[in-house]
Amino acid sequence: MTSIALQRTPLRVRLRHGEALLRFVWSTLLIAVPVFLFATLITFLLGWASGLDPAAGLAGDNATPEMIAQIRAQYGLDRPVYLQYLGWMAGVLRGDLGTSWFNGVPVLELILQRLPVSLSIAGGALLSGIVFGVAFGIAAAVRQGGRLDRAVTLFASTSASLPPFVVSIALILLFSLWLELLPSAGYVPWGEDPTDWLQSIAIPAMALSIELIAELARQLRTGLVSALSENYVTGAVVRGLSARRILFVHVLRNGAGPALSILALRVPMLIGGAVVSEAIFNMPGMGRLAADSALRGDVPVVQGALVVSIVLVLASNLLINILLGILQPASRRRR
C-alpha cells in the first residue's frame, strides 16, 4: 500500500501544478480581454476625434450635399458614434477591419500584404536579442567580476543610450559602405529568395536588437548573480551536481524573471521601432502603410494597423507571462 501511495503522490503533484498553471493562464486571459477592448475603444475614438470624413474627398470638387450625404450613409458615418463603434468592433471580432476610404481595398488585405515585412524586422530583432542577450548575460554572471563581466556591463550601459536610428546609420556605414556585405535599403520577400530576404532584414533587425540585447544581458546577469548566492546552489554542489546542470536547470530557471519582465516590456518597442526602421531602410512594412495612410487621412487603415499591433503586443505578452509562470511557479501564487 505504501508503494502505491508513493507512486500516486507525484501524479497528484503534477495534477495540482497543471491546475495551477491553467488557472494562471485563465487569469492572464481575463486581464488581456479588457485591455484589448479598452485599447480598441481608444483606437476608434482617435479616428472619430480626428474629424476626417471621406465624403468630401470621394465626391470630388463638384459634390452636392446629396452626394456627400449618400457617401456618409454608405460608410455609416451618419450614425451615432456608439453605433459606429459597435459596428466597427463587431467587424473587428469577425476579422473585418473595414475598407480603405481612398482605394476601396479591404484594410485586412492591405495589412496582410505589408505585415510580413514588419514581422521579419521585429522577429529578427527579437530572436537576435534573445540569443545574444541570454548568452552575454550568462557569460557575465558566470565570470562575475572578471574582464568579460566588465565588458558586458560596459556594452550594456553604452548600447542602452544609443537611439536605434543612430545604430542604423552606423551599421549602414559599416556593413553596406565599407565592407559591402549587406544592402542598405529595400526588401526581398522570403518566397523570392531566402538568402536575399535574410540579407535585406539583417541590418534593420540588428539595429533594433542592440538595446534589447543590452537590457536582457544586464537583467539576466543581475538575476543569475542573485540566484547563484542562494542556499539551494550550495546544496546542489554538496550533492555532487555538475556546474552545468546547476546553472541551466536550477539557477537559470530562478534567475530569469527580471529578464522575462524586460522582454515583455520591450516587445511593444520592437513593434514600434519597426516603423522607424522601415522609414530609414525604405521597406514597405505595416508601419509605412500606417504612416502614409495617416498623412492622407485614411482612418480605417490607420485603425486597422493599430488593432493588429495591439493583438501582436497582447499575444506576445501573454506568451511571456505564461512562460514566466511555468519557469517560476511562485509568480502564479501572486495572482
Image (cartoon, helix red, strand yellow):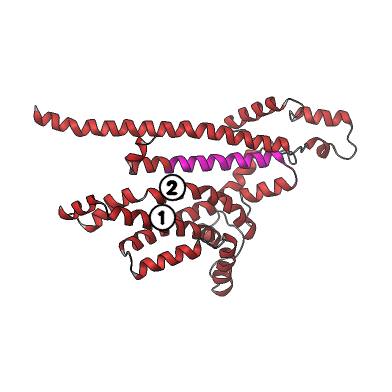
Question: Contact, CB < 8 Å: mark 2 with mark 1?
Answer: yes
Query: Mark 1 or mark 2, which is nearer the start of the sequence?
Result: 1
Question: What residue is drawn where x is 67% and y is 41%?
Answer: 301
Question: What residue is drawn where x is 76% and y is 28%?
Answer: 74
Residue 37, quarter of the rendered image: top right
Taking 299 as reference, is 253 left or right?
A: left
Q: Which of 16 and 299 is in front in this view?
A: 16
Callout 2 crowding tier (Cα within 10 Å): few <14, some 14–19, many ≥20:
some
The kind of secondary structure element at disc 1 is helix
Label placed on residue 219: 1
Residue 315 painted magenta: yes
The kind of secondary structure element at disc 2 is helix
Residue 102 painted magenta: no
**How far across and how far down the image is residue 130, in percent?**
42, 54
Taking 189 as reference, is 156 left or right?
A: left
- Name the amino acid, label 1: Gln
Q: Main secondary structure of the magenta part?
A: helix
Please name the residue that numbered disc 2 is placed on.
Answer: 261
Q: Which of 46 and 107 is in front in this view?
A: 46
- Name the amino acid, label 2: Ser
Quarter of the C terminus within the rendering: top left
